[in-house]
């Protein structure tokens, strides 16, 4: 069974606590604003590449915005 990284629902809360708009975070993390909107709303998963970029843009550890989940193999 493999594991996958899942973003916490707290991503939006952390962004707001940092006083960042979605556009600011998206630009800093090198992703599109619509993509970030979909990630925060739970409509789309974040890619493996975007998770560390989002964490870095927020100035937090990856663990602050994500966790490992069991995945069906």
Image (spheres, rainbow, N blue to C red):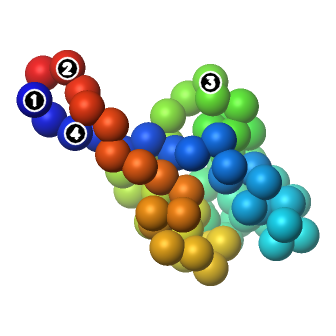
Q: Nearer the viewer, residue 38 or 68?
A: 68
**Residue 12 x %, y %:** 75, 50
Element on which disc 1 rests: loop
Instruction: Please state which of the two labelled residues, at mark 2 or mark 3, is closer to the viewer.
Output: 2
Residue labelled with disc 4: 3
Q: Earlier in the sequence, mark 2 or mark 4?
A: 4
Residue labelled with disc 1: 1
Q: Earlier in the sequence, mark 3 or mark 1?
A: 1
Q: Earlier in the sequence, mark 3 or mark 4?
A: 4
Q: Earlier in the sequence, mark 2 or mark 1?
A: 1
Residue located 14% across and 35% down the image: 2
Image-quadrant location for residue 41: top right
Element on which disc 3 rests: loop
Mark 2 and mark 1 residues within 8 Å of each other at the beta carbon: yes
Mark 1 and mark 4 residues within 8 Å of each other at the beta carbon: yes
**Residue 6 x %, y %:** 44, 41
Query: Residue 72, labelled with which disc?
Result: 2
Determine crowd level at label 2: few under 14, some 14-19, many 20+ residues with C-alpha closer than 10 A: few
Mark 3 and mark 1 residues within 8 Å of each other at the beta carbon: no
Measure the C-alpha gap from mark 2 to mark 4. Answer: 8 Å
Measure the C-alpha gap from mark 2 to mark 3. Answer: 20 Å
Element on which disc 4 rests: strand
Residue located 55% across and 57% down the image: 65
Residue located 49% across and 73% down the image: 61
Determine crowd level at label 1: few under 14, some 14-19, many 20+ residues with C-alpha closer than 10 A: few
Instruction: Please state which of the two labelled residues, at mark 3 or mark 1, is closer to the viewer.
Output: 1
**Residue 16 x %, y %:** 85, 60
Determine crowd level at label 4: few under 14, some 14-19, many 20+ residues with C-alpha closer than 10 A: few
Residue labelled with disc 3: 43
Query: Residue 38, labelled with which disc?
Result: none
Q: The C terminus is located in which quarter?
A: top left
């Amino acid at each position: 069974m493999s594991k996958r990284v899942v973003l916490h629902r707290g991503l939006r809360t952390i962004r707001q606590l940092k006083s960042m708009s979605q556009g600011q975070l998206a630009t800093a993390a090198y992703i599109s604003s619509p993509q970030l909107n979909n990630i925060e709303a739970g409509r789309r998963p974040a890619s493996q590449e975007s998770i560390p970029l989002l964490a870095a843009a927020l100035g937090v550890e990856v663990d602050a915005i994500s966790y490992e989940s069991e995945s069906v193999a």
